[in-house]
Image (cartoon, rainbow, N blue to C red):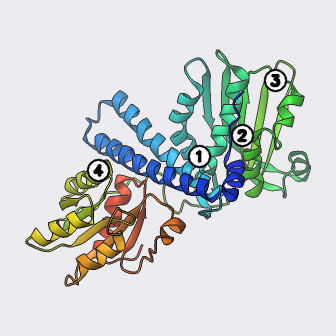
Amino acid sequence: MTTRVEPPQLAILLADNERLRALAASVIHDFNNFAAAIGGYSELVLQRLASDDEHVRAGVRGIRDAATWGARITRRLMAAAGRSPLPPTRLAVDMALTAAEPALRLLVGDGTRLTVNRHSAAAIVELPPGEFEQMLVNLVVTAREAVGAGGIIGIVADTVQVDEAGRRAAGLPAAGDYVRLAVSDTGRRTSETAGSRVFPGGYGLATVHDIVTRNGGAVSVTSGPGAGSTFEVYLPRLDNAVLERPLMPDVDLHHGSETVLVVENEEPVREMIVDVLSLHGYTALAAGDGEEALRVAASHRGALDLIIVDVVMPGISGEALAQRLTAGRPGTRVLYISGYTDDLIRQHGFTLASGHFLQKPFSVDDLARKVREVLRGRVA
């Protein structure tokens, strides 16, 4: 029998074992590098594919979204381990379901039917990044285990107004407007078994319970003998809220003609960044470490407008390298990148004193926008 260890349980293990904490941080750093390369190249392919090749485009979008989704879960894992507290952000429920659906279909497999109905186009909730996706995964995995091959899993999202009687029935902290997310299955689980798994001991559902209650909601389950189960999650709906930033921003990317030196020891990430810069009109120079970067900069005849440098590299650190490269070049700006979370890079002495920062993995849009912001001297 295999037991899945979810973030709250892993956090306890990490707290007791500093070596394991360091290992987890290293694994997440590497995964964020992979996700940056996979997501970046996926977006580049999407931009170059013919607009009428929708079948291939849908597959590439699935690859991109899966990379982004996985990175959000790793950030949630680090937050659960107490390494990087994440502030809540606003989330459009229908957009989040759309983004998660390709990965959820892969998760349930070909033998199980998955239906997704969104009735909450205007509904916005507030959760730390990655928690909505993790909640969905745990609920769908629980349903998949119950139905087996040939079963049906349904996801329905809508908005409800809960009165005082409904508040008591659902166990909510207050009456009001809520987003309701229901995940149902056609499994043979008994009601007693289903209900008991909401609480600690059923690791996946305990995580769902923790996420929902911590964010002002409630979770309940209904089940009948041989009739399957339905898990209902209630999350407070933000009235008249707007997204602080669209999940999939549809913006005209900023181009430029400046010269940018990219210093990144992970070759796939380095090449992806160079490709993105070249696509947007920049002259891109590349180096795999600090010593090579110094040689490239010394041999370059002309202005060096921006340095994109990984914070943690073998040999010369990113910040020390930036200081050496900008000495005598007062117009050169710096953009730091890293697959480590911000609290971990601070342990390497990084202070962000002379540049801006972009967390891996980042999208093509994020990179192009950030490069333009830094070159224009805007604080982001």
List the residue tagged with mark 3.
189
Secondary structure at numbered mark 3: loop
List the residue tagged with mark 4.
267
Secondary structure at numbered mark 4: helix
**Quarter of the figure with residue 314:** bottom left
Q: Are marks 1 and 2 in contact (CB under 8 Å)?
A: no
Secondary structure at numbered mark 2: helix
In the displayed structure, 207 sits above or below 173; it is above
Q: Would you call the spot at circle 4 few (<14 residues within 10 Å), some (14-19), or many (20 or more)?
A: some
Left/right of residue 167 with respect to residue 360 in the rendered view = right
Mark 3, mark 2: which one is toward the viewer? 2
Q: Would you call the spot at circle 3 few (<14 residues within 10 Å), some (14-19), or many (20 or more)?
A: many
Mark 1, mark 2: which one is toward the viewer? 2
The span from disc 4 to disc 3 (Cα, nearest Å) is 49 Å
Residue displayed at 63% across by 61% down: 240
Place of residue 2 in the rendered image (x, y in percent of width and height, measured from the top left): 69, 30
Mark 4, mark 3: which one is toward the viewer? 4
Q: Amino acid at mark 2?
A: Gly
Secondary structure at numbered mark 1: loop
The span from disc 4 to disc 2 (Cα, nearest Å) is 36 Å
Left/right of residue 239 with respect to residue 71 in the rendered view = right
Mark toward the start of the polypeptide (1 vs 3): 1
Mark toward the start of the polypeptide (4 vs 2): 2
List the residue tagged with mark 2.
204
In the displayed structure, 311 sits above or below 206; it is below
Q: Amino acid at mark 3?
A: Arg
Place of residue 9 in the rendered image (x, y in percent of width and height, measured from the top left): 72, 48
Q: Would you call the spot at circle 1 few (<14 residues within 10 Å), some (14-19), or many (20 or more)?
A: few
Mark toward the start of the polypeptide (1 vs 2): 1
